[in-house]
Image (tube, grey):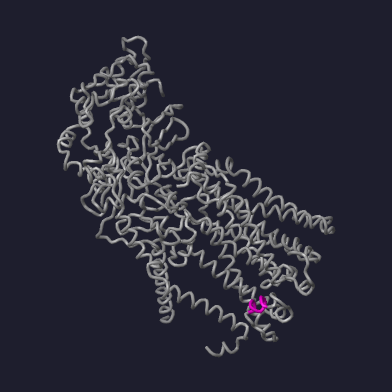
């Protein structure tokens, strides 16, 4: 009897141990290749109030100017989408152009709802782009911004394929991947990112998610929050308020 | 160690030697010849953060403008454009802050710029001031009537359509086109000054619509229903859009 | 900035349907990345065919053994070329060895590749040819004598014991080699299958589908090369060997087809968010390459031919007819597998991750991403193989006879 009991005990403890080890391993897996986050420091987050956006695209222009993004309409760190949801059928989505001419209306069908949605890099907490980069040229900083090292990026474009949000492009001048950095150089000088700076309706907000009092804390308290493609478990740090379910 | 080496035929030994030389050579080169900054991503990432932070700033930020242009800033603070950043209209001004005399930021004075935000666009949020640039005082520069730093209209608009363009458009093709807005809405006079704080009323009872559409109504030419049985517990506008009542 | 590239992107603009994210206009992985899995597939497949002889003792396909190994090596040498030339910064490719990220499937490429090339293929070929190289090194004159002596690492031991060791080593390496070949191509599938952002790629079955299509293409290519080269060198095709090889190919195609069919059914049945745009993709953009070339011509038609040969006696009796039918199905299968790679790589980038629209891919002719370069890349392994056949003749029966024909 004693023998059997001790055997069972051993077996159980061994099972528990191996289970624990496996669990620990699995927990470790998604964290590979990411810089560690220090809880005390800053953690940048971004808020977008969809119902404040007027689709003027000043943010896109400012971003392109501030960050040397090519002016051609194929390269964007941030862009604005216009949604028109008709009574029946598919939503009509367009990318707002950055010129001064007003947007053309497409009223071919009766439109039920319509709105603008600014898009940018979501600075995911589990960034797929960082996970797939073969040479570690893209990484999360301690304050939660995903940056690209254009000195070691080999231009394989795996990160562009891995980004679910289409937020990355290959910069035609440097042949390296490029993306929104929350204007990291401006944050360092205590300036707002260019897009937040010029937004005429305060549809864009930036702040420290760790701070008990920051524009982002207020944004999170005052709004119903949604993130894009939550099913992919990327845990974006760009939060959307009052967004429509049609937005992908 | 020695025995297996002796047992191994001369041929295999040669192969092992080649491999050993190759592997040892690789290890030596990687360990001792290549400097750490080529193989340590930690160093590379720290460098990237440094170069990222050192990137030039183009937009100076609204705070910088207050240092010299305090009069304009004070004027702007009172008006609807109080939350608007100077650089939204005047463009990137970092160069101007560094050399204020020789580099001047642009000031858009023609009719192209203001309509970027203020042209009627049904996707824009309700209540945002929008005009039809073709009909709205054609050929005149915006600033002849509106001071961009305090852009209240020269006269408070009499027509609701000045701001509620989308409703006006919908209404114009509906059977209710003949009705005045005030038939259904009580508009407090303060609504013209603080449109978002003081809002017009909406009809709240079934009897209100019943005045025209109830069976006992004296009005002719309007569709009649039996208030007691039709729609029961719903208020009329929960199913019928009063600005376009013929839509189901 | 490159004005030609901008011009190209501008030309694509009118072909976009629906809405795509603005950064998605450019198809980032072009023809070169189509070629890459195709070539590594051939490597893995050819090695699996070779291991049939050593591990599973399939005596009939012995004539294919050395040819398969040399083919695998020739294609393996070219495989990284297509990857490196596609990079934005080809000269930074070494970084993949200096700062490999363990979380990246692509970073493991260097190591899987090095392992496969150095430990598996080269060693197996060396042990297999060692005795022959010693003999050649003694008998020959001129440059070839020295080439063979260097290649044999100046080893001279042809004793019974040494040869027995060679054989044992071969067996061990082949046994290591099979999972390695699986790894090499399974991981290529994983590069695509692990991208959760892309529903056309993201599938657990992807590595396995890649593996079996690799086996199909490898076996098919080696048999095709055998049917070409052997008669050219003056031999008579060993139909027993070809029959056996084709029979293995037949089963591999069936497994490959079933796997892809399961994947297809699974997607349609689950019918998730992306099913609509994937349907549009298949019907509008890759119908020809997927349905016609890959499935009908690359799988069902060859399967029909091969089944007919198995069923009807008439085919079994006429060698000439069989040869011709084999030849046709081998070509079709190659085309089908190339289309498979095309549909995965290009197809996966033609729909927007917003699932609202499609872009298009315009193949270039010249330039690094162009058709010409790709054709050169595909021809290069054949040139390398020709050199190998000269230096390391796979068939003993011609080894001593003077060779006039170009391999």
Image coordinates for residue C361, horizontal then vertical, percent: 55, 44
Say if the magenta span includes residue C151: yes
Question: In terms of secondary structure, what is the magenta stretch mainly?
Answer: helix
Note whether A97 is above or below C259 in the view shown.
Answer: above
Image coordinates for residue A172, horizontal then vertical, percent: 44, 49
Using the rendered image of the protein, determine whether residue C256 is visible from the camera's viewpoint.
Answer: yes
In the image, taking residue C294 as reference, residue A16 lies left or right, namely left
Q: Residue at x 43, y 75 (%)?
A: A11
Image coordinates for residue C215, horizontal then vertical, percent: 64, 61
Q: In front here: A155 or C124?
A: A155
Q: In front here: C166 or C310?
A: C166
In the image, taking residue B229 as reference, residue B68 lies left or right, namely left
Q: Which residues are magenta?
A: C146-152
Quarter of the image with the C terminus of chain C is: bottom right
Q: Residue at x 59, y 72 (%)?
A: C120
Tally of marks: 0
Image quarter of residue B163? top left
Q: Residue at x 19, y 34 (%)?
A: B76
Image coordinates for residue C198, horizontal then vertical, percent: 49, 50
């Amino acid at each position: 009897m004693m023998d059997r009991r001790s055997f069972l005990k051993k077996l159980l403890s061994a099972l528990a141990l191996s289970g624990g080890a496996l669990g620990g391993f699995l927990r470790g897996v998604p964290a590979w290749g990411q810089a560690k986050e220090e809880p005390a420091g800053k953690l940048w987050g971004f808020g977008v109030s969809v119902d404040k956006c007027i689709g003027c695209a000043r943010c896109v222009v400012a971003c392109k100017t501030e960050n040397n993004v090519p002016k051609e309409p194929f390269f964007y760190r941030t862009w604005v989408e216009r949604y028109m949801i008709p009574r029946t059928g598919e939503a009509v989505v367009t990318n707002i152009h950055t010129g001064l001419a007003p947007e053309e209306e497409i009223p071919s069908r009766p439109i039920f709802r319509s709105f603008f949605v600014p898009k940018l890099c979501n600075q995911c907490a589990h960034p797929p782009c960082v996970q797939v980069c073969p040479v570690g040229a893209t990484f999360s900083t301690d304050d939660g911004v995903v940056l690209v090292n254009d000195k070691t990026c080999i231009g394989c474009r795996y990160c562009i394929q891995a980004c679910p949000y289409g937020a990355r492009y290959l910069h035609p001048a440097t042949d390296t991947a490029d993306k929104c950095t929350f204007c990291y150089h401006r944050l360092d000088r205590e300036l707002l990112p260019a897009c937040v700076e010029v937004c005429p309706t305060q549809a864009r907000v930036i702040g420290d998610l760790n701070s008990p009092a920051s524009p982002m804390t207020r944004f999170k308290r005052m709004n119903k929050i949604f993130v894009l493609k939550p099913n992919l478990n990327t845990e974006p740090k760009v939060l959307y308020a009052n967004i429509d379910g049609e937005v992908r | 160690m020695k025995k297996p080496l002796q047992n191994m035929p001369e041929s295999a030994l040669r192969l092992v030697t080649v491999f050993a030389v190759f592997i040892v050579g690789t290890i030596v080169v990687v360990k001792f010849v290549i400097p750490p900054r080529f193989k340590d991503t930690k160093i590379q990432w720290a460098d990237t953060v440094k170069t990222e932070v050192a990137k030039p700033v183009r937009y100076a930020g609204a705070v910088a403008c207050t240092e010299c242009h305090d009069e304009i800033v004070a004027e702007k603070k009172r008006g609807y454009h109080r939350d608007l950043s100077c650089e939204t209209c005047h463009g990137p001004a970092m160069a101007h802050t560094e050399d204020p005399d020789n580099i001047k930021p642009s000031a858009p004075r023609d009719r192209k710029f203001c309509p970027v935000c203020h042209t009627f666009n049904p996707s824009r949020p309700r209540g945002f001031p929008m005009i039809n640039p073709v009909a709205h005082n054609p050929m005149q520069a915006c600033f002849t009537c509106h001071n961009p730093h305090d852009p209240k209209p020269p006269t408070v608009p009499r027509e609701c359509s000045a701001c509620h363009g989308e409703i006006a458009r919908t209404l114009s093709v509906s059977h209710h086109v003949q009705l005045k807005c005030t038939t259904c809405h009580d508009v407090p006079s303060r609504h013209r000054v603080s449109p978002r704080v003081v809002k017009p009323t909406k009809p709240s009872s079934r009897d209100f619509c019943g005045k025209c559409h109830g069976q006992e109504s004296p009005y002719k030419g309007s569709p009649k229903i039996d208030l007691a049985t039709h729609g029961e517990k719903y208020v009329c506008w929960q199913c019928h859009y009063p600005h376009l009542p013929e839509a189901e | 900035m490159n004005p030609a590239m901008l011009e190209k992107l501008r030309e694509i603009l009118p072909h976009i349907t629906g809405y795509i994210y603005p950064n998605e206009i450019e198809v980032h992985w072009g023809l070169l990345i189509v070629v890459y899995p195709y070539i590594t597939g051939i490597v893995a497949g050819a090695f699996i065919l070779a291991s049939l002889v050593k591990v599973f003792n399939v005596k009939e396909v012995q004539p294919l053994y050395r040819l398969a190994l040399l083919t695998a090596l020739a294609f393996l040498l070219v495989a990284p070329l297509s990857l490196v030339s596609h990079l934005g910064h080809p000269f930074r490719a070494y970084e993949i060895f200096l700062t490999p990220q363990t979380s990246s499937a692509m970073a493991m490429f260097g190591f899987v590749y090095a392992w496969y090339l150095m430990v598996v293929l080269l060693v197996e070929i060396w042990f297999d040819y060692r005795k022959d190289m010693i003999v050649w090194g003694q008998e020959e004159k001129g440059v070839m004598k020295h080439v063979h002596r260097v290649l044999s690492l100046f080893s001279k031991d042809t004793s019974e014991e040494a040869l027995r060791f060679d054989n044992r080593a071969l067996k061990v390496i082949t046994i290591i080699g099979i999972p390695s070949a699986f790894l090499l191509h399974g991981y290529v599938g994983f590069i695509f299958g692990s991208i959760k952002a892309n529903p056309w790629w993201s599938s657990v079955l992807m590595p396995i589908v890649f593996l079996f299509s690799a086996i199909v293409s490898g076996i098919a290519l080696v048999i095709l090369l055998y049917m070409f080269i052997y008669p050219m060198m003056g031999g008579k095709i060993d139909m027993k060997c070809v029959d056996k090889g084709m029979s293995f190919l037949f089963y591999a195609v069936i497994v490959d087809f079933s796997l892809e069919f399961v994947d297809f059914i699974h997607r349609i049945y689950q019918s998730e968010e992306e099913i609509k745009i994937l349907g549009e993709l298949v019907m509008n953009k890759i119908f020809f390459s997927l349905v016609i070339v890959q499935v009908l011509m690359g799988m069902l038609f060859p399967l029909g031919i091969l089944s007919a040969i198995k069923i009807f006696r008439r085919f079994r009796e006429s060698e000439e007819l069989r040869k011709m039918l084999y030849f046709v199905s081998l070509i079709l299968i190659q085309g089908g597998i190339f289309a498979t790679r095309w549909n995965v790589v290009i197809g996966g980038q033609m729909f927007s991750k917003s699932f609202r629209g499609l872009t298009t891919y315009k193949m270039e002719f010249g330039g690094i991403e162009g058709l010409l370069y790709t054709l050169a890349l595909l021809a290069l392994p054949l040139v390398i193989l020709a050199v190998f056949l000269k230096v390391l003749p796979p068939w003993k029966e011609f080894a001593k006879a003077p060779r006039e024909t170009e391999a």
